[in-house]
Image: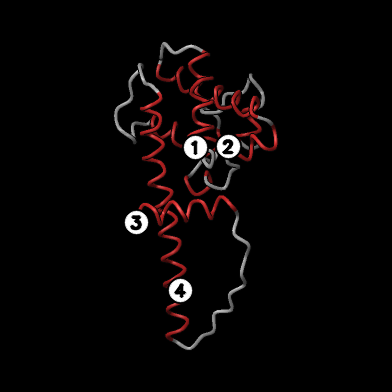
Amino acid sequence: MTLLQLSANENNRVLSSKVASQLTIADAIKSPSLSRIVRESGEEVCQARIAKILTEFGRFLRTDLTIEDYLDYAELLMNDFPTLKFDEMIYTLKQTIKGNYGKTFPNWRYSDLREWLDKSYKEVIALSENEHHKHKDQSSLESRYGRSSEKQEKPVSIDEALIQMEIKKMKK
């Protein structure tokens, strides 16, 4: 069962699930983006699922935020981060709970969430660059030793293209 499927049932705990505990950034970036969830399931469904995850996160930190706050944050996330992967958001919140993105506190706000997502995004970029260099190094070795590298071009997903565009922007 995927984290997105888990979030569909209000009785399921997503952040404390076994699936979430085993989630890596490499796995997280393979999940559907928020814009895709909106396209396939509707804006209200996407907003409700994000709000559910944020509510769970708030329980971990014992916040005083209301469901309206979480719904507002969910709407802001959908608008500000349409290419954010659903599982990437969960990964970020899990890492935040563990203290890997700095100190957490009960009175967190949307600006804090944005900061945590930015830190997570840097991991995504590092992972993408690492994969790119691995591929580049392999191609270099193959050409150096006279081995042909028969590349079979795969279609690039829109999400992958957007990530690559963001990487290029950040390098400038």
Residue at x 58%, y 37% (from the top left corner)? 34
Name the element at disc 3.
helix
Name the mark on residue 171. 3
Residue at x 36%, y 21% (from the top left corner)? 108
Name the element at disc 4.
helix
Name the mark on residue 132. none
Name the mark on residue 138. 4
N-terminal-most mark, 3 or 1: 1
Q: Amino acid at mark 2?
A: Leu
**Residue occupying the far left of the picture:** 103
Lateral position of residue 59 relative to residue 41, left or right: left
Task: Please tell me whether mark 4 or mark 1 is closer to you in this view.
Answer: 1
Residue assigned mark 1:
81
Colouring rule applied to residues:
secondary structure
Q: Nearer the viewer, residue 63 or 157?
A: 157
Name the element at disc 1.
loop
Residue at x 64%, y 20% (from the top left corner)? 10
The spot of residue 133 in percent (x, y) is: 41, 66
Lateral position of residue 39 relative to residue 68, left or right: right
The spot of residue 33 in percent (x, y) is: 58, 41
How far separated are the C-alphas under marks 3 and 1?
20 Å
How far separated are the C-alphas under marks 4 and 1?
33 Å
The local crowd at label 1, few if under 14, some if 14 to 19, many if 20 or more residues have their Cα within 10 Å, is some
Residue assigned mark 2:
34
How far separated are the C-alphas under marks 2 and 1?
8 Å
| Number of marks drawn | 4
Q: Amino acid at mark 4?
A: Gln
Tell me whether circle 4 and circle 1 mark residues in contact (CB < 8 Å).
Answer: no
N-terminal-most mark, 4 or 3: 4
